[in-house]
Image (cartoon, helix red, strand yellow):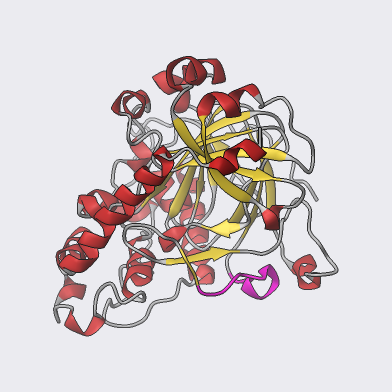
């Protein structure tokens, strides 16, 4: 059943009247920081919910019980402090932030803007006709995608999903303004050759959608809608048996990791082929222009574009989710667990990430550089296949 969402109000209470120390008002998420790097780690969603529930009660007290929290759906928040974001949502539960994107120059981006300034440049585009499972990704000039954005049909549509278009163009990257909720980002510690590409361009026709998936490295995912309208289905952790996850898939990222995609299209499921999917519980909601969505580690998700939609996706690694991300890196044998310093668990999360990055073999760093160069080279090629789609 679709979850109808109402705008949440946020009441500010002056600490001059109602001042409680941070140690009294919040319980920090210690579930990941207490997990030893020298042992295998699995995210414990139930434990995170217990931590979140304890923090909710303390923040309700701070707000004198005038702030409500949705414990089954999603909150829309503005004027949200970093402390409350970290305690209630970050790494634990999805949330929409409504008052950040509007201040960015990127909020003025349009399809016409991209066509005028970048029409001759190549973009990676997914095309579907007639079913998602048979989607094909091709490199095409942006203007060809742009002139066909109004020709979509329910079973025939296109979606630009380009990891490098924005990062390779500093003038576009600069248009994505400040966002205090992602200031602490441990991905910045990664060597440049293996650092995950940031700010993915997502520009889809009506009816277009992502796959049902969990993001690489199991990071916290972010989605910024610039134009258009998205519908989302998010699946809380612990439901893998219902999601028909495709096994042994690789991300192809510079620092390789497993890829977790479902064979099911959640917006058009084939229940004869995937009958257990009917048991999967989801949170469903809409995302409008100017809103940021945060999706915690462990949550499978799929977005559907109800109209032509322009958006940016990104990722976050911080003290609330770093442990699950490091586990994804270690279990691919990028780093040998038994070579970790014996005292690494005594270090800060930031320092732990720093140590692991310093242990990456040179051959992995070199591979990362080659992966990026190869992708850029292939995008420059004029593939004959693209003529089939326009």
**Taking the image as drawn, is residue 67 in sight?**
no
The residue segment tinted magenta is 238-248
Q: Quadrant of residue 178?
A: top left
Viewed as shown, does residue 3 lie left or right of 50?
right
Observer-nearest of 58 and 350: 350
Q: Is residue 2 above or below residue 12?
A: below
x, y percent for residue 296: 49, 55
Query: Furthest-front residue in view?
Result: 384
Nearest to the observer: residue 329 or residue 178: 329
282 relative to 303, above or below? below
At x 51%, y 19%, the residue is: 115
Residue 167, position as x, y percentages in the image:
34, 36
Q: Quadrant of the C terminus?
A: top right
Task: Work out whether 220 lies above or below 237.
Answer: above
Return the x and y of residue 257 as percentages of the image width and height: 40, 66
Whether residue 247 is in magenta: the answer is yes
> Magenta segment, principal secondary structure?
loop
Quick one: 314 or 283, which is closer to the camera? 314
Q: Is residue 366 above or below residue 192?
A: below
**Magenta includes 260?**
no
For residue 336, which quarter of the picture?
A: bottom left
Q: How many marks?
A: 0
Residue 255, can we see it? Answer: yes
Residue 235 is situated, as x and y percent measured from the top left of the image, at 63, 59
Residue visible at 35% across and 46% down in the picture: 197
Q: Judge from the rendering whether residue 3 lies leftward or rightward of residue 312; answer left or right.
A: right
């Amino acid at each position: 059943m679709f979850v109808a969402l109402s705008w949440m109000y946020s009441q500010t209470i002056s600490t001059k009247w109602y001042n409680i120390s941070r140690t009294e008002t919040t319980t920090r998420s210690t579930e990941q920081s207490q997990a030893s790097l020298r042992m295998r780690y699995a995210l414990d969603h139930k434990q995170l919910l217990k931590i979140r529930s304890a923090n909710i009660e303390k923040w309700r007290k701070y707000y004198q019980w005038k702030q409500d929290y949705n414990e089954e759906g999603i909150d829309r928040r503005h004027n949200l402090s970093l402390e409350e974001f970290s305690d209630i949502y970050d790494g634990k539960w999805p949330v929409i932030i409504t008052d950040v994107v509007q201040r960015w120059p990127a909020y003025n981006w349009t399809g016409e803007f991209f066509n005028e300034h970048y029409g001759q440049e190549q973009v990676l585009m997914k095309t579907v006709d007639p079913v998602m499972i048979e989607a094909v990704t091709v490199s095409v000039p942006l203007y060809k995608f742009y002139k066909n954005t109004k020709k979509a049909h329910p079973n025939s549509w296109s979606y630009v999903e380009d990891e490098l278009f924005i990062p390779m163009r500093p003038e576009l990257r600069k248009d994505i303004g400040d966002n205090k909720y992602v200031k602490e980002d441990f991905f910045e510690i990664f060597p440049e050759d293996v650092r995950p590409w940031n700010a993915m361009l997502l520009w889809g026709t009506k009816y277009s959608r992502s796959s049902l998936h969990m993001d690489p490295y199991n990071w916290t995912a972010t989605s910024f809608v610039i134009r258009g309208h998205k519908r989302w289905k998010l699946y809380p952790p612990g439901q893998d048996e219902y999601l028909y996850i495709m096994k042994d898939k690789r991300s192809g990222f510079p620092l390789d990791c497993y890829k977790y995609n479902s064979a099911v299209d959640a917006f058009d499921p084939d229940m004869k082929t995937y009958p257990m999917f009917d048991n999967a519980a989801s949170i469903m909601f809409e995302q409008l222009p100017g809103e940021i969505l945060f999706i915690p580690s462990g949550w499978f998700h799929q977005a559907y574009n109800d109209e032509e939609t322009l958006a940016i996706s990104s990722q976050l690694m911080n003290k609330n989710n770093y442990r699950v991300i490091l586990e994804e890196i270690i279990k691919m044998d990028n780093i040998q667990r038994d070579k970790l310093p014996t005292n690494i668990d005594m270090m800060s999360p930031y320092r732990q990430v720093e140590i692991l990055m310093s242990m990456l073999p040179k051959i992995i760093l070199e591979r990362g550089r080659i992966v990026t160069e190869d992708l850029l080279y292939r995008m420059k090629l004029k593939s004959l296949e693209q003529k089939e789609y326009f």
